[in-house]
Image (spheres, grey):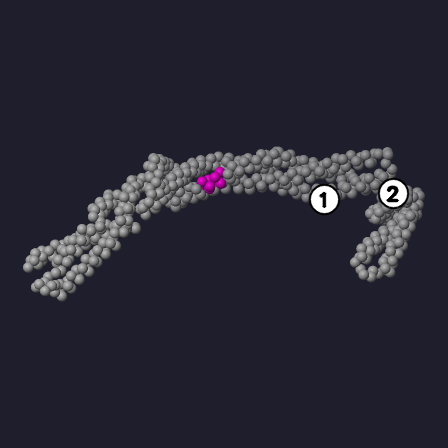
Amino acid sequence: MTFWQENYGFVKEVYDFRLAKYQEWMDNLEGIVSKVMAPNVQYTYKEFKIIQDSLSSLCRDLEKEGMKEWLDMMLEKVAIRVSDEGGPSSRDKELRTAEKKKLQALIERHDKLMPPTIETQAKVEMYARCYSYGDDMKQTLKTLEEMRHLSSKDIHPHNMNMVEEQIEKAEKVINTVDSSREQYEELLKRGQKLVKCDNVAPFLHALLEKLETTWKEANEKSKQRLEMLTNSAKDWETYDLMRNEINEPIEKLESDLKKYRKFYDPQMFAKKLSSKKQVWDECKAKTDEQLTTIKKCYSTIIVLAGDEKKEFLDKEVAEVEEKLQVVAKCQKKLDTLTEYNNKLTDAVDRCRALNDWAGPGNSKLKEICTSEELTPENRVKEILLLQEDARSKVPLVDPLAADYKALLTEDDLEKSETAKTTLQEFVECRQFVEEVVAEIEKEAGSISTDDRLYADYYCLVKDFTPWVGEAEANTKVALPKPQTLDDCLALLETCQTFDAGCAENKVKLDDAATARSSMEKQSNTENMVETLGPRWEVVKKVAEERVVKIQILLDTWKELQSTTEDLATKMSEVPKQNEPNIEELEKVFTNMKELNVKKKELVGGV
């Protein structure tokens, strides 16, 4: 019996032990490699250092050639168990084959484990640097994240003091972020340098991006928060200031409203109203601007103050708007007073207009009655014209008296001497107007009907005579010969105007004849109508003849122009026609020549 046969149990135990250790080593190595290459796991540097050291320990004899040779050799020994010198039994062969397959599987597993292990060995050093970088970044990143959170969390300061407290906190946040700038820039440079290396950890890009994003957001949000709080503080300050300052114009208007009252001198009242309206305009412009500012500030601070403060702020704004009702009250009162003064001014102006008529009217009546230059007929005419004017004034007096009564009540007259003075001006004016009208009616009443009729006849003839003289002179002057169609149109218009003037003046002559014939006692003076009538007829005949003559000339001229244009059109179409109608062209041309001859004859006869 050999050594191996004698010690088979011991040898087999050693072989199994070393085989198990070989398998355990591969299990450990595979576990460490998977930890290093885990895709979504990030360790601390300390944790990774343990993994790195474990990997280094396991990889000291990575090939394990001696282990594999010894196991292969020992497999040959332990697999041979012979009962006799005849060689290995069939059971030994089966055992050897099974153990061989088992060992070969371990070796194949080893061979497959080599590439990822080698790759892991190449990356583990760089991974260690990345994990070290991550640990160094943690404190700075944590600080920046805290500052970002403080700059973005909801806050609702309810008053100016709370806003100031928040401003102090925001400034501290900005200072903290600024104090981290040096560490951030150093970490950023390290990270950018690491990223450019080979075999960097997958998390490094995201970590570096997170650092940059957090720094940017912490900076922006902290500054935005401070700006928002600073603006809010300004708005709170402006809000409180405007709520106090708006009381000044409101109190001014309330004081003025108590002083608004009527004045009974329109001119003085207009000046006072203008002054009060100017004050009102200034106060309204100021309060409008202040209210707009208050509401603008309100819309800003309510966003920060939140719903808890909304009811209180709404109440404060509503109180301001309620105070501003005095602006509308003042406007309504001023409008009422302005309307009253407009009516009073109109009444006083109408009163003074009557007075302005009565004075000159009275003087004119005296002049008519005492003048030695006026003929009796002209005197009658002037008195009658004055009477007509006076009668147009009489209907104005009673409505004016009613307006004065409505505007100047008994209460007004008791309280104001100015009201009495204004009313007295009207009373005196009314008395004077009535006296003048009565005097004019007295003088007009002394004129008989025949005197009136003869005065009408005389004055109408007097107006007609110079016109007929001018008209006769006009008929003796030859009309200008028109050179163009426009000249002809203008000449026709002139002749028609002259003819219409003849008809208008004939009415005067007929009215004069009617007035003379209506007299009960006929006058012995020469009847000028009988002389002027034939003269008018001669002028009228010439005027009508001229209108007819020029109208014929105008119609002929227009027809000539139309025919000329028609001929030009037909001539322009001749080159386009294969067989032009020469007979039609000659007919149109002949008609044009005849019209042209007729036009020249008519122009010559003008």
The residue identified by callout 2 is: 467
Q: Quadrant of residue 23?
A: bottom left
Which class describes the residues within 10 Å of circle 2: few (<14), some (14-19), or many (20+)?
some
Tell me which segment is drawn in magenta: 290-298
Q: Which residue does the numbered mark 1 point to in the structure image?
A: 395
Majority secondary structure in the magenta region: helix
Circle 1 SS class: helix
Check the picture and name the quadrant holding the N terminus. Answer: bottom left
Q: Residue furthest front?
A: 86
- Residue 326, position as x, y percentages in the image: 51, 40
Residue at 33% across, 39% down: 190
Q: Residue at x 78, y 43 (%)?
A: 388
> As shown in the figure, which amino acid type bears the numbered disc 1?
Pro
Decide if residue 258 is on the left or right side of residue 302.
right
Tell me if mark 1 has few (under 14), some (14-19) or many (20+) residues whose alpha carbon lies within 10 angstroms of its own: few
**Is residue 295 magenta-colored?**
yes
Q: Position of residue 126 (x, y in %)?
A: 29, 44
